[in-house]
Image (spheres, coloured by chain):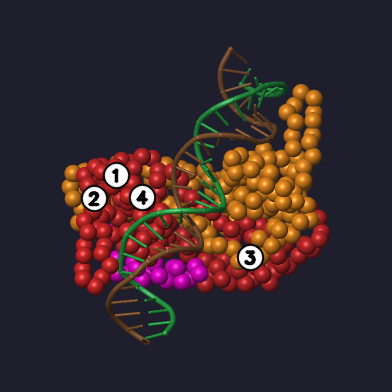
Chain colours: A orange, B red, C green, D brown
DNA sequence: GCTCACATGTAATAAGTTACATGATTTC
DNA sequence: GAAATCATGTAACTTATTACATGTGAGC
């Protein structure tokens, strides 16, 4: 249901094609807490059209691929508000990195160091991008969520920087491959 | 593959039944960044037994349901280290709450207020639980990941407390149900 | 007597990912 | 000439969720 909710969200702010919806999911402030690919968006739009939540018109420009421009209907708006009003499920956080950290002794300090570097770089890039988005952002609700993201990611980045050596030390007391745990 | 990796992680620190593995996924510090249910654990264990990554023995106690106690094999250990050594995918964060925040004007200030309360309470409970876990925790790697969690969740909680009124104000400029967006 | 914790598993279903298939235009 | 962007979609596959099915013992 999550792709559907996301499509309705986008369309509630204006018409869009499947392609554009997917771009919104990949770039911009949505990308930080939402995911949607072609394989989920196109079927979802088709389904919603059947259910009367959206309509579409074709736009044919000579020399360009024709686009299906989707619009939300009143039923679609109602369904969206309905979904928003349902008590939302909790946020989902899944971290292969933290599992790696927990078992860092099995892979050794060097590998962990590299992964920490990668993570720090990734966090800095992301925070930088969000700060830039924030500057050009005019919608106060978007600004609020962006600041939320910047705040939490900065806390994460800061923790990584302050405590990386501790984890590297833990990882250095390496467990041999062939050795039994405990 | 994530359930498999998680099962191998648990079994790499000692034998366990499917039931126990699932309990670990629900309670304790794993639960903050991992998810696994019966429906994914039991099939995963069966598959891994076929692949020679785990073995099991039956424990029959009179008057108790018999348990299948799984052990990891050397091949299982190798597979686990292998999976850990592969560059991990990025953390996954999905937030129905932030989507709600973005479109808070559609549901109004009262609903948002309630949801913020719920979220703050939830965060406080979680942070409290993690602090308690930290106190009784002896493994340094577990302590590191717990502190990571406490740090980021505290940043989140703090942001919510400091900026809730801003969001409530945004949400109060309510868009009517029947009104077109933009 | 009821509910909770222990304990195993299956089956139907939902949902999404990845790769495939196609093709024009624009930019390097 | 190659690669990226625009643009639509399908199909095979993987993965996990939810509910079902079954049963015991302990505590209230």
* Circles 4 and 2 on the same chain: yes
Give the labeled residue for mark 1. Answer: B50
Give the labeled residue for mark 2. Answer: B55
B24 in relation to D27, above or below? above
- Judged by depth in the image, the label closer to the viewer, 3 or 1, is 1
Res. A38 in view: yes
- Judged by depth in the image, the label closer to the viewer, 1 or 4, is 1
Q: Residue at x 41, y 58 (%)?
A: B37
Give the CA distance from mark 1 to mark 4. Answer: 10 Å
In this view of the protein, which residue sits in the foreground, B60 or A57? B60
Give the CA distance from mark 4 to mark 2. Answer: 13 Å
Residue B3: image x %, image y %? 38, 51
Instruction: Say few, some or many: other residues with alpha carbon within 10 Å of mark 4 (under 14 / 14 to 19 / 20 or more).
Output: some
Give the CA distance from mark 3 to mark 4. Answer: 33 Å
Res. B147 in view: no
**SS of the residue under disc 4:** helix
Chain holding disc 1: B
Magenta extent: B122-140
Predominant secondary structure in magenta?
Answer: helix
Give the labeled residue for mark 3. Answer: A86
A10 in relation to B23, above or below? above
Chain holding disc 3: A
**SS of the residue under disc 1:** helix
- Judge from the rendering whether residue B165 lies leftward or rightward of residue A69; answer left or right: left
């Amino acid at each position: 249901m999550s792709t559907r909710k996301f499509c309705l969200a986008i369309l509630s702010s204006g018409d869009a094609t499947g392609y554009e919806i997917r771009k919104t999911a990949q770039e911009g402030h949505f990308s930080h807490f939402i995911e949607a690919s072609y394989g989920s968006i196109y079927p979802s739009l088709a389904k919603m059209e059947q259910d009367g939540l959206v309509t579409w018109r074709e736009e044919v420009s000579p020399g360009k691929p024709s686009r299906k421009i989707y619009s939300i209907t009143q039923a679609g708006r109602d369904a969206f508000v309905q979904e928003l009003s349902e008590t939302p499920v909790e946020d989902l956080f899944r971290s292969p990195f933290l599992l790696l950290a927990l078992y860092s002794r099995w892979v050794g300090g060097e590998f962990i160091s590299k992964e920490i570097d990668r993570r720090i770089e990734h966090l800095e890039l992301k925070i930088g991008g969000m700060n830039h988005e924030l500057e050009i952002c005019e919608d106060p609700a978007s600004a609020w969520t962006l600041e939320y993201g910047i705040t939490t990611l900065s806390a994460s980045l800061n923790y990584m920087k302050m405590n990386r050596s501790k984890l590297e030390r833990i990882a250095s007391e390496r467990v041999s491959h062939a050795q039994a745990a405990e």
